[in-house]
Amino acid sequence: AVWALRAAHHHSMSTLEDVLEGKDYAFPVEEESILQFWKDTDAFKEQLRRSEGRPEYVFYDGPPFATGLPHYGHILAGTIKDVVTRFACSTGHHVTRRFGWDCHGLPVEFEIDKKLGIKGKEDVLRMGIDKYNEECRSIVMRYSKEWEKTVTRTGRWIDFENDYKTLDPNYMESVWWVFKTLWEKDLVYKGFKVMPYSTACNTPLSNFEAGLDYRDVSDPAVMVSFPIIGCDLGASLVAWTTTPWTLPSNLALCVNPAFMYVYVRSPAGAVYVVAEVRITFLPGAAKKVKGGKAGDGASLADGWEIVKKVTGAELKDVRYQPLFPFFAEEMQATAFKVCVDGYVTNDSGTGVVHQAPAYGEDDYRVCIASGVVAKGGVLPDPVDDNGCFCEPVTAPFLGKHVKEADKELIAAIKDMGRLVDNARLVHSYPYCWRSHTPLIYKAVASYFVKVEEIKTQLLANNKKTHWVPAYVQEKRFHNWLENAHDWSISRSRYWGTPIPVWTSEDGEEVRVIGSIAELEEATGTKITDIHRHFIDHLEIPSSRGPGFPPLRRIDEVFDCWFESGSMPYAQQHYPFENKERFEKSIFPANFIAEGLDQTRGWFYTLMVLSTALFDKPAFQNLVCNGLVLASDGKKMSKSLKNYPDPQIILNKYGADALRLYLINSPVVRAEPLRFKEDGVFSVLKDLFLPWYNAYRFLVQNVRRVEEETGVAFNPSAPGQNAVNVLDRWIASATSSLVTFVKAEMEAYRLYTVVPRLVAFIGQLTNVYVRYNRSRLKGKNGDDDTRRALAVLFDVLLVLCKTMAPFTPFFVEKMYQNLRRCLPDQGNAEPSVHFCMFPEAAADALDARVETSVVRMQAVIEIGRQIRERNNKSLKTPLKRMVVVHPDGDFLADLKGELRDYVVEELNVRQLDVCADPKEWATVKAEPNFAALGKRLGKAMAQVGKAVKNMTQEDIVLFQSTGSFAVEGHVLGADDLVVKHEFCVPAGYAKEDLDAASGEEDVMVIMELEVDQSLLDAGAAREFVNRVQKLRKSAGLQASDTVAVFFEATKGSDAEACANLTRMVANERTYLEDSLGCVLQPASLQPLHAVVIASETCALSTGAGFIATLTCPAVALDGDAVKAACNGVDELAAAITALVVSRDYVKLKSECDANGGVIGVVVDGAQVTLRAGKELMFSK
């Protein structure tokens, strides 16, 4: 019956294609179809082609490693990049977007070491660097296809075909140029420094790499005695350390020259030397205090006594007995003495610091300054590249990893009688960001960039950039630059860009190569690849003559961060290609974006190299996102499986929902986000489904209007300008939205844009469409319907173009249908992503109507709250409501154009307004403590008291002027909170009135008393609701026309039947307007009518009825027809048979066209039938 009904109304001229119900619309499936559409039309390349010739918007993509799969952090950063670059393209720019790959360095080598079981340098050399490097090359793009699939699936448009890879010879050659330029600027040097060192990866790390992975760990914390040589008291200095493995390399002790030190004797007779303020931290030295801990301001325990005090300076050069014998003889002349330096603190330990210059930056500096070791001289370092003890350390420590040797070292020290205390300490300790193993600090030779020398320029260039959020730039990044050290850029590894330094064996001759051509010329060899195994064997003849041995390349390769920091130049093969274009138009970048962790990574290396090379920042604008964590707040972990696979989320909810969830969260303000799957689902349910339903509602009603009138819908037709108040409101709100989004996006503030977009979609679906449903369905006639549909169409089209950067799939799906209504079916712009960002319609802006509608919504929300707390269903009308507000314009709008919306939404019969709150309430003012507290300080109490004593007149004056002076302070609009306390006026019972105040300074009063007419009106609403539910359960669409018949349920008592009859009679106009047809008793249901659905329903009044839906069918009044046939039964029967056989729609159209009458001829006899007399139409 339903399909027959639809077939009867089908019209082939529909402009818009029909769309699925919301429950049947599968967002992920539809996104896949859009991906195919983009692929078939080569949409991304077409967008680039169409935008050629526009100003270039330069975007740099930070290169990820393809040795791992993309996670939510990558998806987040990629979404931010896609949003910004799509917006740039839509605002008149050409935006080249090339994907990049980080192909060198520890992440790749570490994977190969695991695969091949490689433990150290010897294993690599045994295998051969050539074979090792080719193994690395074989896996660098291991997951590239998975990356491309995921990135593409998330809707990001970026060029994978013309990507850049850090392993390409052209890229590597530009890195050589960068290094040589720095060398020529004297910004590179070779030095010997104590650096963070990864024993698992056999290489030093830069300071910023060491800061990438700090963990709380439990380490041994020991106090060790160092007997003073020649001391009459037999005293020992006591040092404290959390790295017992460094003790075999101890060469000195350090004290602070300004501190007081004491010789303190224990009850056992041992004399220890420690800082005076640290004396009670010696085990057993502090007198125990009830409820306190040893050392917390405690005095000396019984039996302990101070026998001598000296300054730290007086301890200088005091000699002591070495702890281990490994370097005792070799270093006896200069070592094993007390040094002094101000870096020693008194907040932990003993105030005496053990010095192992090979394993501590301060240790190395102090020992050089004190002559313990000489710069460039022998430095005791019995730890090999793998972090294991080597000679002259002996068994049982020899060959053991230093961190694993701690227990045996402590046991040995105890056996020597030198262990004063053995405890454990939980503290923050750096781990290798790649191997996830503890770092050690170790003196190594390295090439350094002189960051400290260009610090002033770095700080100045940082100020030239714009970061979102700003605090990351102004605090975190600024502080990092302020405290930056010279950057170690060499790594003792194999798979990377070789450092192009050739040197003589004696170190007297050094040559830095800056290009492949230069190396070919210097060696006379044709070169196709510049990885180590292709060039390590190449020798450069000495410039000192043939009598000198040739120059050979040093072993080191570049830190991979040096390579990624070189990407602005290397991806363009600058300066060997694109030199003029690079310098004129593609450097610096307009925009980059990565996670907060790159503050000390890529952001830093970009800034250092661009400042060193060109004295300018490498980027102008930067968006920094926070970290995406698991739902429990922990780091996402594959092993813990504490987060859902991104592919599952994409397949379950779609990319648009995931994109909007991520960028409408704290993470775009560089704060952490706890990823929750139900958050993605909420975006789909609360945002996309209502948005889709608004679009579907448009499509349904456009098709209905076209089918009913036979006239195509043209949203651009003249005479369809917005007249209705909500039409003007949504048009104005749309223009305001476009203005806001453009301004905020140009400032890169995504965190303000997305909430505004989300709020607007809520306004569109919950206010405009909801309040205008009857208009859009044709309640006020064809002209008004087409106006409303044209407004809704324009809003949805503008919203598509505005949201295109954010939700690329959904808006494309809508646009492909909406464009069918555009001139030439939108063929000029066949994709929404080819459209320019919309311009705000200045003539549509109407601040007053926007303000009034916002306040109207506040009124409706407050009214609902009053109904809810008084158990008054919205289906039951209330007699009267009063809205109190001081703004006369708003009250005029509320009584005028907005009245019907408020009355309908709150189901009240009468709406009154009042500008004077004193008629209904007592007005009180309270201070806004949050706003005033900091500003007023001690005066807050006095001002607060005065505010609470403000008179009614004072408060009204404050509301009208926005300021008020009290106790010598001028208070502004945000400094006071005005509250209304409702007072029941004379003549009303307390239970018959209720009131509430809310946002926008609105107060609402509602009369709650209900009479029979109101109960009938409520029952009528319920009746309509039951019929509408029956329509839905029958699978009917809004455009499907049906006849509705009713009768009281069998067995209903007389009173229930009377109530139903009375209600239908009194509310017939409302019932028929709402149902869109004439409501008829079941007794008039034609026998020939096709029944679609029938159901027994009940109303809250107790009345029951049977509702029956049929295909539209004409009903004839038998007696009236017989009378029209002059009482001839045979003619009346023939006329009746002929009429009921006619097509209902055509018969009704003919009747309407003839002024409500039709002529019927049978056997030469003509009979005139009249609508409402002989004929009854259901609509």
Image (spheres, grey):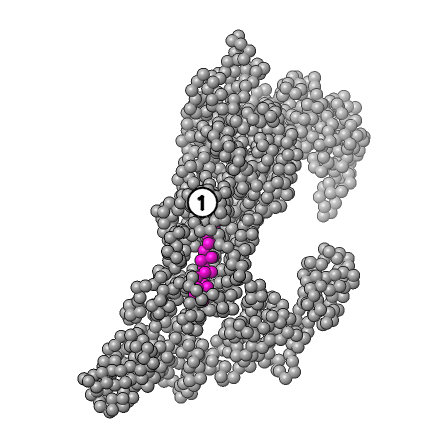
Q: Is 798 included in the stretch rendered in magenta?
A: yes
**Residue at (22%, 90%) from the top-left corner?**
1128
How many numbered marks are there? 1
**Residue at (58%, 46%) from the top-left corner?**
468
Tell me the quadrant of the picture where the C terminus can be found.
Answer: bottom left
Badge 1 crowding class, 10 Å Cα cut-off, few under 14, some 14 to 19, many 20 or more, is some
Range covered by the magenta-colored residues: 788-805
Q: Is residue 213 above or below residue 443?
A: below
Instruction: State the image coordinates of residue 524 (x, y, percent, origin top left).
Output: 45, 16
Q: Is residue 513 above or below residue 1134?
A: above
Choose top left, top right, bottom left or bottom right for residue 1047: bottom left
Left or right for 1052, reference 478: left
Main SS, magenta residues: helix
Residue that extends furthest to the left in the rendered view of this protein: 1163
Instruction: State the image coordinates of residue 999 (x, y, percent, origin top left).
Output: 60, 66
* Residue 242 in sight from this viewpoint: no
Left or right for 90, reference 915: left
Instruction: State the image coordinates of residue 490 (x, y, percent, origin top left).
Output: 55, 27
Left or right for 300, reference 196: right
Q: In front: 689, or 1105? A: 689
Q: Which residue is mark 1?
A: 51
Instruction: State the image coordinates of residue 1173 (x, y, percent, origin top left).
Output: 32, 86
